[in-house]
Image (cartoon, helix red, strand yellow):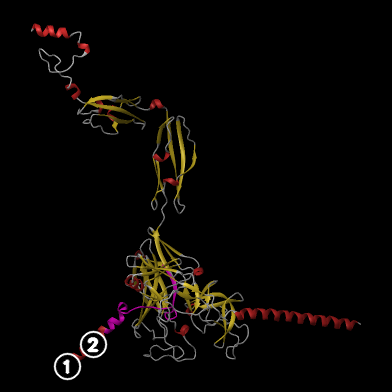
Amino acid sequence: MKIIKTIIKLLVLLGASSYFSLNPKAMNEQLVNKDKIPYEILSIKMVNNTLEIRGWVLISYTQHYLNDSDHSTELEFFSLNDSFKVLATNTSTNMTNQMQYFGTPKCGPNILNQIPEVCNYSYENVGFKVNIPIELFKAEESYQTNIISHAYKSNLSYKTPVYFPMNNDITINYLDKIYTIKSKLNDTELKVSATTVIARTQPIKTSPVWFYGDSCSSTYKNQLFFLKNSIYKNILEKGSSENISYYRVKAVITNCDGDRRRIIEGNIISPVWIGSTYVLYTGTPLQISSKYVNRPPYFEVQEINLYKGQKLELFNYVKAIDPEEGDISHRIVINSSNYIDEVGKYTISLTVKDNENLSSSTNVIVNVLANENKPKIFADNIRILQNTEFKLLDYFYAYDNEDGDLSHKIIQLNSIDTSIISIQELCLFVEDSSKLNDSICVNIEIYSNDTFYNKFRSLSKNHPFYKEPIPVNWNDIIYILDTILNTK
Amino acid sequence: MNKSILDIYNSMANFYNSNNETTNIAYEFPCLSEDITLNGLKEGELLVSYNPDYIQNSNGLLIGIDSRFIKFYHLNSEKKVVKTLELNWINNCESDLLELHVIQEIRNDYSMLLFFLLIFLLLIIKIIRRKNENY
């Protein structure tokens, strides 16, 4: 029983440890230069609504790469406001020959962390393919990419920024967004990262090599080698062979170093090719950004009716709207116009452009009408008693030659407060069936009843004008009142 | 600056040289080649350069940087700038790496001149000989 229990425990432990070692998230990723994690991006394209990225990657000189059980690859995408990782599928690319250091044997199956001068590792199935649903890239964000390689046997996880130098950007239109993938060749600089990189005349590992200048040693004579850490700012061309990119540069010889004749960037020796495996990239890494496809602007217009002599306020009737930029009416340009201030029908041709020069055009019809066609509001200044209910039709009416009585269509443009003793302005508007209109403003005087009440007098038999002087105009007839009162 | 504020400021992102000292000096070829390391970024924070564009989301080597990168911003998790970092690039150091090229070019020029002089002399000798043959 004890033996069985021990076996079960061991199995559980083994299972747990293999789970954690296979789980990329359990491994801490270290940011390193490309010389420790050589990689190559071979293609980026759109496949079935996913962004498919293919390439190869490995952590150099640490362990054998054979199959899914000993390594995995992730791509990390991050922008200022977002980040996500996608696990890749291993593919069958074999880089053993390209990474081989000639003259040393193959490393033993469990030998870890050996330099190539001691033994060579196998790098099988180091290819990867990743399909990223395109919707994961948020609009108006610019993502940078890190490639992550997990080497389980050596328990290492390295990551480094991805460069995919190319002459032209890749653009993909999908639904309402445009995706741009860029990693500019002319923005990228190369830094030589190894000491034994041979200057080649063609972009292939087996190409003829360069010999130039004086001999540096009997071993290498005047064969040209790149100087480690030298920088190439002008990359003239990109080529590729056997899953490795090569860059064409121009060089000049410099002094001997390590028995080898060295070259640095210059203008004497050309063409010189260097494989991407031996360079570090600098500059802006691969960027994937998306934004909404620019939509053209459009006009909101209505036919314009105005009277002869009336000023044409075009922008009261026309608006230009851009879906991305909003109201861009201020950018409307008049292409042509036959409009004059005479009775008739005219056309004004307009164009507007958005920030990306997408344009839209329209024609606006302007009808200039004679004044007699317009309706008329008949209204004068009025006086109304305080607190009286104000009824528009009691005081004003409107008439149109075509439509007849338009009084019921009079619109009161502002309100009147009849509770306040004051003179208030009231503005009225009316429009006929031809969209012609008339407007007028009149004064409404609100008066108080109190002035009348104050005029009522306390009449008495003896004092018709009680406690007040007798008005002058009553002086002549006061005797009549007296007579009447006395008679009764 | 108040010491505690200074401590907080120093605990933010900093560049370090190979001796683990804070630095703002970087060397360009043909000067000393030295890796610069970034430390002080916390989870969710970023080191950003806007011209040229670059984002680094974790501590470690400052990768892909050349003399075009001068000004960086340490953004906190709310993407607000909490610190500006600058790199001063040194590229005018004394180095014998470029001198050979000049010497070589001059010597190459002399060798070509000597070569043409030799051909010229041979031609003249041949002409003189032919003249002597005629007479």
Residue A287 drawn in magenta: no
Sequence-wise, which precedes: disc 2 or disc 1?
1
- Given residues A106 and A392, the one toward you in this image is A392
Gap between marks 2 and 1, in whole Å? 14 Å
Q: Which mark is residue A61?
A: none
Percent position of residue B88, x then y: 47, 72
Q: Amino acid at mark 1?
A: Lys
Q: Amino acid at mark 2?
A: Leu
Q: Which mark is residue A11?
A: 2
Position in image of residue A300 (x %, y %):
39, 43
| Residue at the spot of label 1 | A2
Characterize the local packing of mark 1: few (<14), some (14-19) or many (20 or more) Cα atoms within 10 angstroms: few
Question: Does the rendering let one see residue A159?
Answer: yes
**Local secondary structure at mark 2:** helix
Identified at 21% across, 88% down, the residue is: A9
Q: How many numbered markers are drawn?
A: 2
Q: Foreground: A176 or B51?
A: B51
- Taking the magenta stretch, the answer to whether it contains residue A34 is yes
